[in-house]
Image (cartoon, helix red, strand yellow):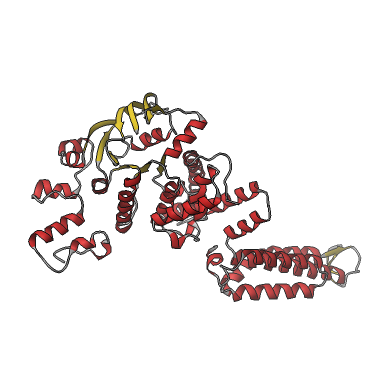
Amino acid sequence: MDRYAYTNKIADIGPGIKVAVCILAILIAMSSGNWLINAGIFIVMAVSTLACGIPLSFYSKVLAIPFGFMLMGFFGIVLNISADNILAWSVRLGPHYYGFTQESVADGVLTISRSAAALSGTIFLALTTSADSIMRVALRYHVPKVLLEVSVLIYRSIFIFLEEAIVIYRAQELRHGYESFRVARISWAMLLKELFKRVFSRYDAMVISLECRNYNGQFKMGD
Amino acid sequence: MIRIEGLSYTYDDGTHALKRVDMDFNAGRSIGIIGANGSGKSTLLLAVMGVIKASSGRITVQDELLKFGKKRLRQHRQHVNMVFQDPEKQIFFSRIYDDVAFGLRNLDMDEKLIHKKVRSSLDKVDMTPLGNKPVHFLSYGQKKRVSIAGILAMDPEVILMDEPSSGLDPQMKESLKRIIHTQSRDRRIVVSSHDMDFIYEVCDYIYVLSGGQVIGEGTPTKVFLDKGLLERASLKMPWLAAIHAYLGFPLERSAKELFENDRRSKNEEGNNIGQFWNDTSGYKRKDD
């Protein structure tokens, strides 16, 4: 998933600049009331991301998930229900009119363009900059250390967790654990149970290992 | 420097993991603790680290009793530290540099000094070019190297290694042998393992554990030619010892020596199989 963050064309370029670009994109998007500007930001960020060597197929997959939610939000904003026929365009279902007004469409377009612009900036950062270098930038700008320590640990643990889950899943799949809905249900339950158990045994191992390495309450990352 | 006297340990469920174990880590530069699965090797190492408290017996470090106060343990772990069997369980950071620096930063060392130590310990395990890759992109062998570097960086006088060769490919095993050989000049290395060939080549004094008890000890030559002792411990002879004992080959310390001496004695020119031994990728059987 984060392989591109380490291998793209600007992976080695100062993370500070990339973080600044991302924040700038978000700030402009939040403050502008013009959907054209937002669309412009989206296009610029998307083109820059693709120009860094991120394949279009991967990029569109990454975009697809949040876009799904954004579309749902869009319809939520645009859709109006009224007892009288006052909407710009509507259909009548039972006693109510369902449709939208010009203002609601304008609101919806602005909101979706704003989120798309902010999202494109965030994804640009996420796909071109490794989590570790983002942490470095955060450390430099005095983001509270506790937050960073937690982020560093979560980041590392995600991969351990995923790897464990994949190993268990494969082992089950190879012994026909997902052949039918009935066995798949049992396999999923066992997978979750096993993961839960492993989290605890990992925790025990981690405590021992931390103790041996003189852990004293802080995951230090240097200054 | 580390001496274990009459150490016993019983788990909560009543299993006797260690029974009156006596060991002296002064007996060699690199000590091997061999035994089958469940013979008590890992428990013993955890006891030496001060992670678990023995039910009876004592561990002394430079004639001082191992104490379990927070401060004393902190000191103890600057002198003695341990490479865990599974590197995944030892690595907390996704940035290699941060993980190797972890132990040093816990001691509040100056960042400049830390930088030097991290570089040199990554060098010692041949990891420098990979210094900026995140840990989840590394192979198992590379993770192993990172976990070893993390301990080397702290520069302890004694390093314990729990099953260090398990899961490693032949080439990585050879390079681990080299790391242990080099490091045992500056410090003491204690290796627990049931990889007989590995222990035979890297250790110069051996303890045999079985059912939590020391059932034999001595130089590799003595221990590894004692077929009865090895069988009682559910172990077997290293192949170098076996071809000496049963096929009459001279007893050599490593495959490289065996092949090179053989070639020299026959005055053969040409293909030198021994030179490939440290780089097993080029190794071919004689009759290939």
Q: Is residue A172 above or below residue A112?
A: above
The picture places residue B131, in percent across and down from the top left corner, at 48, 59
Quarter occupied by residue A66: bottom right
Q: With A209 as the anchor, is B198 left or right in this view?
A: left
Residue B165 in view of the camera = no
Q: Nearer the viewer, residue A33 or A89?
A: A33
Q: Position of residue A108 (x, y in %)?
A: 80, 68
In the picture, measured across the screen, residue A97 lies left or right of residue A205, that is right
Residue B15 higher or lower than B241, as above or below: above
Viewer-side residue, B283 vs B115: B115
Q: In the picture shown, does residue A118 fall above or below B141?
A: below
Residue, x 51% and y 32% (percent of image)? B71
Question: Residue B194, located in which quarter of the rendered image?
Answer: top left
Quarter of the image with the N terminus of chain B in it: top left
Taking the image as shown, residue B51 lies to the left or right of residue A152, namely left
Q: Residue at x 31, y 58 (%)?
A: B171
Q: Residue at x 79, y 73 (%)?
A: A35
Residue B32 at x, y percent in the picture: 28, 41
Q: Position of residue A209 (x, y in %)?
A: 47, 41
**Which quarter of the picture shows residue B120?**
bottom left
Q: Quadrant of the C terminus of chain B?
A: bottom left
